[in-house]
């Protein structure tokens, strides 16, 4: 039986938070709820409900945030960031998630949302709905006691500590410039910056309050945790100089032994700034953001391509019937993509398309995994065109 679905109203936030806390094992207190309220767009939340002994009971939640995301080549593209997905343990495996995901994606298609994103707590769930892993992020640890910068590494300086109000005023502009140059980057509006600066004690994981570092072209925040560990919370650099300057300060924290950062892209230049690149130890590597192409021609026409491409792609999308055969013609300055009856050069599924949209994964790798069916040189040619200017990074957990 399919569950009853309805849109949330403004008064549903506390009940939604209760469902979420049961799914993720974390209680939200009243301060959390107040902090979350500005980000809560009730109409963007689908609730699955049933009649319980005390009236309506919420048995599933799936929401989304309205974001803008940067595509390769710099196009800023509207998207929905799917979030707050949970079904209580008492109601699992009855098709509640499937009903919510199907309704949510159908709604996106109807309102013209061409691309949706999410971050997955479990990587085995969302592929069936057409989401593919679309960036990779790694957790990196540096034993800073041994870290020496190369003698020829840039040392531009210019970093200052800032109190939260000054850092809050500075960070958004730097982040905007960082995001404009970073495929997959999710824009943060004022509400997201407020959320980043709430810095409530119970969300510090035992660490200090945030320390903020500002540079004319960069921003970083970190906490110091027991055991002399510095955990970098945010680090955005709009220039290579700001990146080097911020890292020089972080690796210069004398009483800290380990500097740990999450969400470090694979092409981060930090190892190459050091005399011993191995000190930048990758201690975790996983999918970052996931992408679901809802409108194939709109999404593929919006991004730019590293070299000229002219290819017919056939994309299977049984869930939304948004697939078909499309001719993509594009290059560094623009692209167009439209349905065609010409023969396809590559056949793939919609989730695989999500994995190439920001250039995180390669057509050749997907072909080797049996996810792309294309003759000889085609995947390689597509890789040359889909290559991003730098590794994608979304930069904000949601
Ligand atoms: C994950 C969760 C949302 C699944 O909800 P559900 O209502 O039980 O899912 P459904 O019954 O609709 O199942 C949908 C499909 O996903 C599969 N599935 C569900 N949970 C899965 C899991 N944890 N791992 C792998 N597959 C899973 C089901 O087998 C089913 O597959 P099928 O339709 O292809 O046969 C729910 O278990 C939950 O809330 N877990 C805790 C919070 C969480 O992890 N949320 C996701 C955060 S990003």
Image: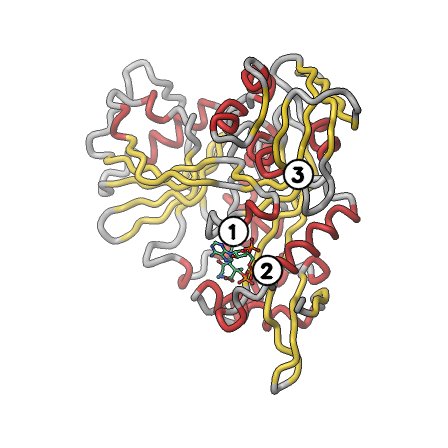
Seen at 53% across and 46% down, the residue is 168
Residue 233 in sight from this viewpoint: yes
Q: Nearer the viewer, mark 1 or mark 3?
A: 1
Pick the quarter of the image with the N terminus: bottom right
Residue at disc 1, CB closer than 8 Å to ligand 1 = yes
Seen at 65% across and 59% down, the residue is 100
Ranked by sequence position, the earlier of labels 2 and 1 is 2
Up-down: is 237 above or below 8? above
| Residues at marks 3 and 2, CA–CA distance in whole angstroms | 19 Å
Q: Do the residues labelled 2 and 1 touch (CB within 8 Å)?
A: yes
Q: Nearer the viewer, residue 38 or 255?
A: 38
Q: Mark 1 points at which residue?
A: 125
| Residues at marks 1 and 3, CA–CA distance in whole angstroms | 17 Å
Up-down: is 275 above or below 204? above
Q: Mark 3 points at which residue?
A: 293
Ranked by sequence position, the earlier of labels 3 and 2 is 2
Q: Crowdedness of circle 3 by 10 Å Cα count: few (<14), some, many (20+)?
A: many
Up-down: is 287 above or below 5? above
Q: Mark 2 points at which residue?
A: 97
Pinpoint residue 113: horizontal percent, then vertical percent. Answer: 73, 43
């Amino acid at each position: 039986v399919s569950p009853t679905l309805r849109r949330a109203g403004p008064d549903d936030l506390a009940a939604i938070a209760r469902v979420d806390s049961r799914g993720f094992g974390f209680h939200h207190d009243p301060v959390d709820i107040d902090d979350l309220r500005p980000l809560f767009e009730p109409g963007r939340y689908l609730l699955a409900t049933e009649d319980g002994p005390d009236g309506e009971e919420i048995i599933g939640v799936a929401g989304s945030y309205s974001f803008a995301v940067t595509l390769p080549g710099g196009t800023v593209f509207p998207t929905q960031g799917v979030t707050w997905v949970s079904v209580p343990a008492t109601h699992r495996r009855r098709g509640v998630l499937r009903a919510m995901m199907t309704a949510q994606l159908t709604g996106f298609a109807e309102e013209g949302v061409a691309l949706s994103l999410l971050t997955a707590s479990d990587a085995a769930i969302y592929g069936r709905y057409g989401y593919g892993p679309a960036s990779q992020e790694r957790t990196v640890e540096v034993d800073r006691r041994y870290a020496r910068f190369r003698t020829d590494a840039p040392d531009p300086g210019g970093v200052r500590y800032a109190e939260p109000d000054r850092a809050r005023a500075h960070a958004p502009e730097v982040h905007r410039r960082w995001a404009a140059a970073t495929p997959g980057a999710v824009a943060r509006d004022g509400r997201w910056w407020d959320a980043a600066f709430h810095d409530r004690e119970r969300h510090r994981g035992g660490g200090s309050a945030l320390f903020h570092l500002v540079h004319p072209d960069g921003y970083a925040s970190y906490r110091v945790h027991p055991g002399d560990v510095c955990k970098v919370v945010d680090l955005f650099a709009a220039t290579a100089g700001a990146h080097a300057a911020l890292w020089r300060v972080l690796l210069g924290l004398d009483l800290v032994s380990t500097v740990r950062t999450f969400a470090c892209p694979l092409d981060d230049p930090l190892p190459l700034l050091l005399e011993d690149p191995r000190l930048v130890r990758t201690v975790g590597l996983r999918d970052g953001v996931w992408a679901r192409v809802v409108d194939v021609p709109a999404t593929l026409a919006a991004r730019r391509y590293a070299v000229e491409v002219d290819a017919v792609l056939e994309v299977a999308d049984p869930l939304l019937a948004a697939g078909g055969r499309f001719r993509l013609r594009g290059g560094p300055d623009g692209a167009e993509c439209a349905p065609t009856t010409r023969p396809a050069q590559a056949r793939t599924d919609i989730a695989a398309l999500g994995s190439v949209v920001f250039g995180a994964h390669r057509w050749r790798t997907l072909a080797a995994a049996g996810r792309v069916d294309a003759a000889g040189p085609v995947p390689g040619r597509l890789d040359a065109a889909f290559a991003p200017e730098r590794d994608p990074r979304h930069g904000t957990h949601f």
